[in-house]
Image (cartoon, rainbow, N blue to C red):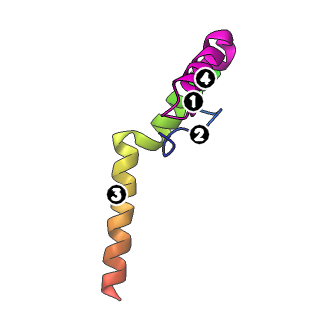
Amino acid sequence: MKEIIIDEFNGLLAISESAENMAEKLSQLLGDPEKMQRLSKNAIKDSQDRFLPEVVARQTEAFYRKIIDKKSL
Protein backbone atom coordinates (compact mmCIF):
# COMPACT_ATOMS: atom_id res chain seq x y z
CA MET A 1 0.00 0.00 0.00
CA LYS A 2 1.77 3.09 -1.24
CA GLU A 3 0.01 5.25 1.38
CA ILE A 4 1.79 3.34 4.15
CA ILE A 5 4.88 1.78 2.58
CA ILE A 6 7.89 3.96 1.85
CA ASP A 7 9.75 1.97 -0.79
CA GLU A 8 13.15 0.74 0.39
CA PHE A 9 12.60 2.24 3.87
CA ASN A 10 9.84 0.24 5.57
CA GLY A 11 9.04 -2.19 2.79
CA LEU A 12 9.15 -2.78 -0.92
CA LEU A 13 6.50 -1.60 -3.31
CA ALA A 14 5.55 -4.00 -6.07
CA ILE A 15 3.24 -3.73 -9.04
CA SER A 16 0.10 -5.42 -7.76
CA GLU A 17 -0.90 -6.77 -11.17
CA SER A 18 2.52 -8.30 -11.77
CA ALA A 19 3.32 -11.66 -10.19
CA GLU A 20 6.79 -11.38 -11.69
CA ASN A 21 7.44 -8.04 -9.99
CA MET A 22 6.17 -9.35 -6.66
CA ALA A 23 8.36 -12.44 -7.00
CA GLU A 24 11.34 -10.18 -7.77
CA LYS A 25 10.74 -8.13 -4.62
CA LEU A 26 10.38 -11.27 -2.52
CA SER A 27 13.58 -12.67 -4.00
CA GLN A 28 15.36 -9.45 -3.05
CA LEU A 29 14.35 -9.95 0.56
CA LEU A 30 15.14 -13.64 0.66
CA GLY A 31 18.54 -12.97 -0.90
CA ASP A 32 19.42 -10.14 1.47
CA PRO A 33 18.59 -10.93 5.12
CA GLU A 34 20.21 -7.67 6.30
CA LYS A 35 17.91 -5.66 4.06
CA MET A 36 14.92 -7.66 5.27
CA GLN A 37 15.92 -6.96 8.89
CA ARG A 38 16.44 -3.23 8.22
CA LEU A 39 13.08 -2.88 6.46
CA SER A 40 11.40 -4.82 9.25
CA LYS A 41 12.88 -2.64 12.00
CA ASN A 42 11.95 0.51 10.09
CA ALA A 43 8.41 -0.79 9.53
CA ILE A 44 7.91 -1.50 13.22
CA LYS A 45 9.22 1.94 14.26
CA ASP A 46 7.28 3.75 11.54
CA SER A 47 4.01 1.99 12.37
CA GLN A 48 4.44 2.84 16.06
CA ASP A 49 5.20 6.46 15.23
CA ARG A 50 2.18 6.81 12.95
CA PHE A 51 -0.48 4.31 13.98
CA LEU A 52 -0.44 3.64 17.72
CA PRO A 53 -3.86 4.52 19.19
CA GLU A 54 -2.33 7.35 21.23
CA VAL A 55 -0.81 8.89 18.11
CA VAL A 56 -4.02 8.63 16.12
CA ALA A 57 -6.00 10.06 19.05
CA ARG A 58 -3.68 13.09 19.28
CA GLN A 59 -3.95 13.67 15.53
CA THR A 60 -7.74 13.35 15.66
CA GLU A 61 -7.97 15.76 18.59
CA ALA A 62 -5.73 18.28 16.82
CA PHE A 63 -7.89 18.03 13.69
CA TYR A 64 -11.11 18.62 15.65
CA ARG A 65 -9.57 21.54 17.54
CA LYS A 66 -8.54 23.10 14.23
CA ILE A 67 -12.10 22.76 12.90
CA ILE A 68 -13.63 24.13 16.11
CA ASP A 69 -11.20 27.07 16.10
CA LYS A 70 -12.19 27.92 12.52
CA LYS A 71 -15.89 27.82 13.45
CA SER A 72 -15.23 30.16 16.39
CA LEU A 73 -13.90 32.92 14.15
Q: For the residues carrying marks 4 and 3, which lies nearer the camera in this image?
A: 4
Q: What residue did someone put label 4 on? A: 25
Q: In the image, which residues are magenta?
A: 13-36
Residue at image position (63%, 33%) is 9
Residue 4 at x, y = what percent?
A: 49, 41
Chain-order first, disc 3 or disc 2: 2
Q: CA distance from mark 4 to mark 2?
A: 14 Å
Q: For the residues carrying marks 1 and 3, which lies nearer the camera in this image?
A: 1
Q: Amino acid at mark 4?
A: Lys
Q: Amino acid at mark 3?
A: Thr
Q: For the residues carrying marks 4 and 2, which lies nearer the camera in this image?
A: 4
Considering only vertical position in the picture, is 35 above or below 2? above
Q: Secondary structure at mark 3?
A: helix
Residue at image position (48%, 34%) is 17
Q: CA distance from mark 3 to mark 2?
A: 23 Å
Quarter-wise, where is residue 15 in the image? top right
Q: For the residues carrying marks 3 and 2, which lies nearer the camera in this image?
A: 2
Residue 49 at x, y = what percent?
A: 49, 40
Q: What residue did someone put label 1 on? A: 11
Residue at image position (53%, 36%) is 46
Considering only vertical position in the picture, is 15 above or below 21? below
Residue 62 at x, y = what percent?
A: 39, 63
Q: CA distance from mark 1 to mark 2?
A: 6 Å
Magenta span dominant secondary structure = helix
Chain-order first, disc 1 or disc 3: 1
Q: Amino acid at mark 2?
A: Ile
User: For residue 41: magenta?
Assistant: no
Q: What residue did someone put label 3 on? A: 60
Q: What residue did someone put label 2 on? A: 6
Q: CA distance from mark 1 to mark 3?
A: 26 Å
Considering only vertical position in the picture, is 15 above or below 36? below
